Image: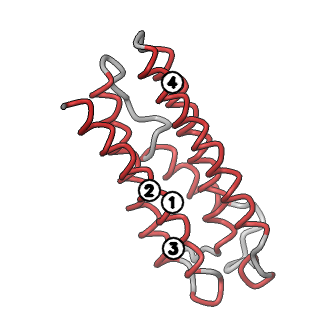
Amino acid sequence: MMYDFNADDIFEVAEQLERNGARFYRQAAESVSDQDAKAFLQKLAAMEDDHEKTFTQMRSALTADEKSSTVFDPEGESVHYLRVLADTRVFFEKEMDTSSMEAILKDAITAEKDSIVFYLGMRDAVPENMGRARLDGIIKEEMGHIRLLSNELKALKG
């Protein structure tokens, strides 16, 4: 079965991805002993929390059309499909290397890139009248994460 999604579906998954990211950064912070690295990872977790709130606000601003169902789906299978896809591709069920700060940053960059690819793919599955353009806001937020993580990785390498 082919699904079309609305912006509300994508924002719901975006909120979950941010929760997954925050959990990853908190677990990574627990695995490092360097206090500066720990503080940076905790800051990233807090940023993920803030992004979840941003996406929740963006979601609450959606119009009725952007929230309306695109197909008959009384069991909510389309959103379940998105959750499973997102959870297996970004942060949640991937094996992350927390043996060093460099490894953590590299895995985090990969996860952020995966999230952008996920959102770009989902953007094409959201009809224009159902909020496709709003997904650009999510993508922009995730690109900011990559810049921050890349700068930190460069600083770490000296």
Residue 130 placement (x, y as % from top left): 65, 83
**Mark 4 touching mark 3, by CB under 8 A?**
no
Q: Is residue 59 left or right of residue 125?
A: right
> Mark 3 sits on what residue?
136
Which residue in the rendered view is the most extreme toward the left? 158
Mark 4 or 1: in front is 4
* Quarter that holds the C terminus: top left
Q: Is residue 37 toward the left or the right of residue 53 in the image?
A: left
Alpha carbon separation for disc pair 4 and 2: 19 Å
Measured Cα–Cα span from mark 2 to mark 3: 12 Å
Res 19 → quadrant: top right
What amino acid is at disc 3? Asp
Q: CA distance from mark 1 to mark 3?
A: 9 Å
| Residue at 49% across, 52% down | 85
Q: Quadrant of residue 99?
A: top left
Residue 76 vertical placement versus 121 (above, below): above
Secondary structure type for disc 3? helix
Q: In the rendered image, which residue does mark 4 sit on?
A: 39
Disc 2 marks which amino acid?
A: Gly
